[in-house]
Amino acid sequence: MAVITASRAHRGPNRLRRRIGDNLQAYLFLAAGLASFALFSWYPLVKGVILSFQQDNLVVPPYWVGLDNFRALFADPLFFTAWRNTLEFTGLALVFGYAVPFVVAMVINEFRHLKGYFRIAVYLPVMLPPIVSVLLWQYFYDPGSGLFNSVLESLHLPTSDWTQSPKMAMISLVLVSTWSNMGGATIMYLAGLSTIPSELYEAAELDGASVWQRVRHVTLPQMRFVLLVLLLLQIIATMQVFVEPYQLTGTTNEETITVMVLIYRYAFTVNNDFGLAAAMSVLLFVVLAAFSAVYLRLTRNAD
């Protein structure tokens, strides 16, 4: 009995060492992944939260100010202006950037020839760096010699100040964002459309369904998961819009200042206070995290 017990006790450590040796490579890959996440994702996140409770201008050592940064945010009139503009941009971007790519994807999916060509043509703007796309549209919007006003003048139509007009500035930003990012959403919609069995459409046609009825009763239910995921991703992305308002209308235009532009102002131009900018970033993170949690909960219950 004593021999059996000693043998089991001896096999225990050996089995553990053998198991570690067999999975050593997997553990090393896991450790590298965790280290990368910790260094590039978790550490900046924790550092940003800590910084939101400090005042730091990179000149004097940071010091603890408690909730003063958050009180300063709510006392700033631009705080509410930036959130209103961001929500307005998100709403308009969803109208143009969410629905239009879906319609374009359905049209391209119906083509029997040159489907690959249209896919490349739609996706080409995504390959451009965002700042290049914005600079291109900045030329289009030029009130003097820009492309759009030149076309309007040739048609004897009234011209516009585009990005400098209070009525047109936000729509101008949305058009740039839609054009720049439409290709990615269209490709994802096309991938989803390609998975719908053609038998469903054939059965609908035999039942005499119109085009709209096929879209409503076949396409939309089959694309429900893709549509829900893209809706969440687009809302999160458009809430963080920065390049378009920064380059086209600047950081001082109250008609188009967004949350991300205001964070830039706090950190680099007006206040030079990274603590204040971090507090604004934390608020944006909390809002997006809460929205994502509620959205996922509602969509999961709907399933």
Image (spheres, helix red, strand yellow):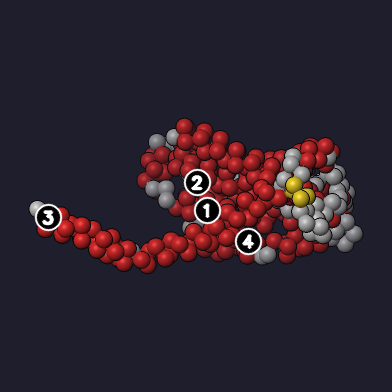
* Disc 1: CA contacts within 10 A as few (<14), some (14-19) or many (>=20): some
The residue to which callout 4 is attached is: 126
Residue found at x 64% / y 45%: 285
- Of residue 109 and residue 176, the one placed in the foreground of this image is 176
Which percent across, then down, holds residue 269?
Answer: 84, 55
- Answer yes or no: do the residues labelled 2 and 1 have beta carbons within 8 Å? yes
Q: Amino acid at mark 4?
A: Val
Residue 210: x and y in percent read: 49, 38
Which is more toward the observer, 111 or 5? 5
| Badge 3 or badge 1: first in the primary sequence | 3
Identify the residue shown where x is 44% and y is 42%: 222
Which residue is identified by label 2? 226
- Distance CA(mark 4)–CA(mark 1): 13 Å
Nearer the N terminus, badge 4 or badge 1?
Answer: 4
Residue at image point 20% right, 61% down: 10
- N-terminal of the pair, mark 3 or mark 2, is 3
Residue 2 is marked as 3
Q: Secondary structure at mark 2?
A: helix
Q: Residue at x 45, y 62 (%)?
A: 31
